[in-house]
Image (cartoon, rainbow, N blue to C red):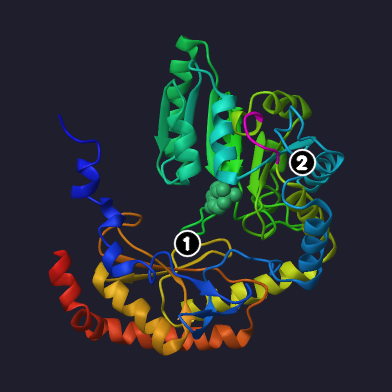
Amino acid sequence: MKDLFDKIYKDKGPLGKWATHAEGYFVFPKLEGQISNRMKFQGKDVITWSINDYLGLANDPEIREADAQAAKLYGSAYPMGARMMSGHTSLHEQLQNELAAFVSKEAAYLLNFGYQGMVSTIDALVTKNDIIVYDVDSHACIIDGVRLHMGKRFTYKHNDVQSLEKNLERATKLADQTGGGILVISEGVFGMRGEQGRLKEIIELKKKFNFRFLVDDAHGFGTLGKTGAGAGEEQGIQDGIDVYFATFAKSMASTGAFIAADKEIIDYLKYNLRSQMFAKSLQMQLVVGALKRLDMLRTRPEMKANLWKIVDALQSGLKDRGFDIGTTQSCVTPVYLKGSIPEAMALVKDLRENYGIFCSIVVYPVIPKGLILLRMIPTATHTLEDVEITLNAFSAIRDRLHNGTYKRLSAAVSAQMGE
Ligand SMILES: Cc1ncc(COP(=O)(O)O)c(C=O)c1O
């Protein structure tokens, strides 16, 4: 019989195999200093383009003060126990009511983490007779929620409404046999490539098919729509989203998440969300901090305006210089280049060491082989000067990629890794 750990000793997995070359630098890097447009990496100043602090709230003095006061008053223990048992408070309720109003839904419920909350929401919404139809490029929290499902599930091609329609036909036939219903899941903004989910067209399909629609709007909340209520508001179809989900980990610069829907649906979820029923309540510091953040979202529209000033400058600057930024329709700014993983490593090292630019690098298996994705997250704290410096650096590294500099620099790593 094999030892359970044999596979681990032999194969570190598609990303784990890079650990010796990547850890501490490309993965698990340590960014130091206060969260902002400029931080330190390995003692060097860098312009950071990899932090989802869209509105610049992470280090806003009023936010820091509110967080500090809440910590002083409540510590990090309060309240103890799950919401259902002993962890419920008026402030949790107040935050839920304010969040629901902000995203134009009847009710909301807090989740401790977006990832776990989404897994649990999917789990609570379906029984084995129901069918799930979801975008093939969904975030891991959606995929893992679907993995818990005991019934049938279909994926549709990424953001492809025709493919969704075909799968809804299959799902409808099947649901007629099982006696179940259909749950469709999309993201409001796809976090890697930045396209908005085609929410409006998906909701149009409700005229032809009977389904309920769950939207993960992690990247849309706070950044899209007139008031910042997200991709549903941006597309004018918030009503057609049956269950709206967003995390506090991006625009809100915190930890926690929520779902919002009709009151009867939230009342049901409250009693069936295992991630909340069997876990300690969201700690008060985070609840008080979220109330303050939400207040700032409502009362400081200039934060979103500043964010979009930077997004527009960065995205138009990249396009003007001939970079491929795909089909983003949000703040998420992907830059696609062609090259191997070792070349990508040499390029990112050059960007960090010689140009002081820190952005995330995404490679196979997250994106197709041979592509390098530099994923940039503009924020309200960036300046037009940051954008200019970055654009010049990108032009320089593209030249070096094309003239083979990174291929030469990475030859030793390539040979070692068989790439
Ligand atoms: C699309 C999407 N959904 C869910 C999550 C998970 O949220 P959290 O970090 O609150 O667990 C993330 C990442 O934060 C995300 O990008």
Span highlighted in magenta in the image = 277-281
Number of numbered discs on residues = 2
Q: Residue at x 67, y 71 (%)?
A: 307
Q: Residue 187's x, y, as percent?
A: 55, 46
Q: Which mark is residue 327?
A: 1
Is tag 2's residue or tag 1's residue first in the polypeptide sequence? Answer: 2
The answer to which quarter of the image holds residue 265 is top right
Q: Quadrant of the C terminus?
A: bottom left
Q: Looking at the image, can residue 198 be seen?
A: no
Mark 2, residues whose alpha carbon is within 10 Å: few (<14), some, or many (≥20)?
A: some
Residue mark closest to the camera, 2 vs 1: 2
Instruction: Decide if ligand 1 comes within 8 Å of the CB at mark 2.
Output: no
Q: SS for tag 1?
A: loop
Magenta: predominant secondary structure element?
loop
As shown in the figure, which amino acid type bears the numbered disc 2? Pro
Q: Residue 219's x, y, as percent?
A: 60, 55
Q: Quadrant of the N terminus?
A: top left
Q: Which residue is mark 2?
A: 79
Residue 279 shown in magenta: yes
Q: Is residue 351 above or below residue 187?
A: below
Q: Looking at the image, can residue 145 be seen?
A: yes
The answer to which quarter of the image holds residue 58 is bottom right
As shown in the figure, which amino acid type bears the numbered disc 1? Thr
Q: Residue at x 25, y 64 (%)?
A: 370
Along the line of sight, the residue nearer the viewer: 87 or 216: 87
